[in-house]
Image: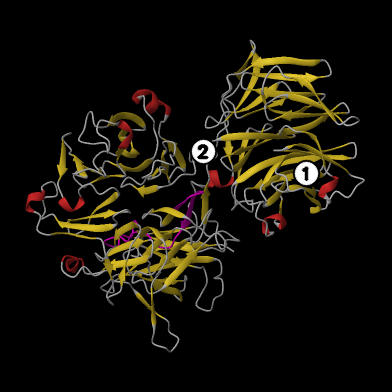
Amino acid sequence: MIKRIFALCLLLSAMTLKAGIGDWTLYPSYHNATYCQKAGDKLYVLTSGALYSYSKADNELYTYDKINSLSDINITHISYCSSTKALVIVYANANIDILYDDGEVYNIADLKNKSLQQKNINHIGIQGSTAYLSTDFGVVELDLENLEFSNTYNTGLKTKCARLFKDRLYTATESGLHFCDTSKNMLDKNNWKKVHQNAMKALDELNGKLYCLASDGKFLEIIPETDKVTMVDNSDSYSYLYRDGDSFIAVSASRIVKIDSNGTSKICNIDGKYNFILKDKESYWCCKGYNGVEECTVKDNALAAVAEPLQPNSPVRNYSEFMKFTDSGKLLIAGGNINYFDITFHDGTLMEYNPVSGKWTNLPEDTIRKATGRNYVNMCSIDEDPLEPGHYFASSFGYGIYEFRNGEFVKHYDYNNSSLESVIPNNNRYIRVPTVKFDSEGNLWCINTGMKNIIKVLKRDGTWIELPYKDLEYLPTVVQPLIDSRGWLWVTSLQSKPGIFCAKMNGTPLDTSDDETKRWINHFTNQDGVSYEIYQLYALEEDKNGTIWIGTNIGLFVIDNPEAFFSNGIFKQIKVPRNDGTGLADYLMSGTYIKSIKIDGANRKWIGTNDNGIYLISADGLETIHHFKTDNSPLPSNTIESIAINDESGEVFIGTDKGIVSYMSDATRPQKTLDENSVHAYPNPVRPGYNGYISIAGLTSDCNVKIVDAAGMLVNEGTSTGGQYKWNGRNSRGEKVASGVYYVLLYDSYGNESIATKILVTR
């Protein structure tokens, strides 16, 4: 088998480069290959709603996304037009991109922007330079030469595909096969006739004859002269067919066949594990789902791989229920679904991302299923052992806990070998563990929701203990424990009985008998005496001042005096002055459905919402610094599921229900003391044409920064944000500085000056 060496282009290769402040990076999944198209020596692959191409001439993979080329996300269909040398790309929202061979992209958003209840595009059929778009309401003709819609035929029928043949437009619909003569008024639904009652899913022509594939997989010929449909081949149930020169290629679950004027002949047997198989001369490009795209040839009546699968380095799925950075600098992601009604299950998804190398590692799945003999779904949290990097524990909402070491599965914990319990006794399906979290001593804290003793701890020595808290007994939706900077335990209940519990653990976290004070509150009252009924309580974070920030379905609350939680139980709402002369103020983010909160290096709050994107607010909450949504940023969705911040670089990773994206923020974790050897600037040197920010990192909090030229003249000054300062490369008059060497002067809290680094600027 040939081993290919790929050049991963654009963002996938650029992941290892340090992004500038304000830069965005998308991390779509390119794993689940579902369909492919030929375009000369290039192969386009559709996978998990994303697109990449493979150049057979130079073994190069090229990825496409909303930042580097495309106008949208969630691709549903692609088809190549050889006459215009362009790939037609259709999105789930009916947006359309035309991607030319030279990389230029032209967007057509007319159909997307129309006020139609049903405008899904189900198929792209290209004939010459016309694309026939089959939709839920009929057929739309797209002129690929003039890049405009030429005709729309609203038949009121959900159309699977369409074909122009001998002055008739045929449409395959769920209710049967229809046609209309082009000489008639095709906008009049009465001029459309039904040829066949059965549902159809494919139409194509060969040697002057029209053929179709019925929904039951039978291959049929349409005879326009008599409006009859005759059977050509009913020997198998074919999933799809397409033209290959002077013949059809048809694929079923067990074989690939060639259909031409001589009839049907088998090419080879297959095992049904392919989403799509494309014949390309003597090769067959096989879309194997999460195993990528594999080039094969026919050998001994079967497909045989000739090279390793094509698969760009990326997340295995666009799931991101839970994300966190470890002390070793890795981003860990669990793509489960906390689901109390057992309706929706996500395939077991655990991922690791190394921001230094840009490499994604997807933890094993098939080996776990084989080893345990059970379902592997809904992985909702993951954490790294602080005393052993690469040693992970991950939890499933339904199937217990899994242990990994150096990327390999080690052990599964359930009611048989641990203190974990099932909601239904002795049942492996309902061991609900939404969260696992290590403490600094290497003890693993586990939430086993719905049980009498919800908090269970796997101690460093391998023994299990349970922490009895009467207020938490049998709560069905406890999800998150937090041991704050005071050593107090905070626990949240998400829904059903939403609320917050806190216990002063008196320095003995594994012994509840000496806890000083405990309190459970499930009714929120703010500082003005306003009471609220909370339906869902998702987020709880402690900031750098010890304040507890809480995100609920009705807005944002804070506990700025945690000691008072045990007495008055007040949940404060921050008041933001209107500054309009009225003296009035509004509660910060009141009514906003909040799902995630994270604190950055400058003590600012990143707040993810259920349907309104992500906010960055100042440390005190009085200023909204950014509000990113899909219409003003590359966010894949306004539904934010999780947030994780790389304190070393300031990069904020945002998990949405449609994939992961990151934003390079200007705040990093501040250093405790200034060390000239750790202070650095990037990019450095600053190359001609660069217009972004220049970052000076490795600073202390609120560090005073001055930038001077070689003559000692002040060019710029300010204060660090967290451990970083950003300079736009301009002087105090807003002019770009000239080429030369610029010195960064730092002043500590005592006013002592030091030259920390220098920056070379070339224009």
Residue bearing mark 1: 132
**Along the horizontal axis of the image, is 610 left or right of 266?**
left
Residue bearing mark 2: 313
* Quadrant of the rendering where the N terminus is positioned: top right
**Along the horizontal axis of the image, is 161 left or right of 368?**
right
Q: Is residue 580 magenta?
A: no
| Location of residue 157 (image quadrant) | top right
| Location of residue 362 (image quadrant) | top left
Percent coordinates x, y for residue 719 in the rendering: 38, 71
Alpha carbons under labels 2 and 1: distance apart: 34 Å
Whether 220 is drawn above or below 25: the answer is above
**Residue sitting nearer the eye, 648 or 500:** 500
The answer to whether marks 2 and 1 mark residues whose Cβ atoms lie closer than 8 Å is no
Kindly identify the amino acid type of the residue bearing the numbered disc 1: Tyr
Regarding residue 279, the answer to whether it shows in the image is: yes
**Residue sitting nearer the eye, 742 or 8:** 8
Farthest-out residue, bottom: 581
Residue occupying the point 78% across, 44% down: 131
Tell which circle, 2 or 1, labels the residue nearer the N-terminal end.
Answer: 1
The prevailing secondary structure element of the residues shown in magenta is loop
Which circle marks residue 208 in the picture? Answer: none
Percent coordinates x, y for residue 633 in the rendering: 55, 60
Regarding residue 391, the answer to whether it shows in the image is: no
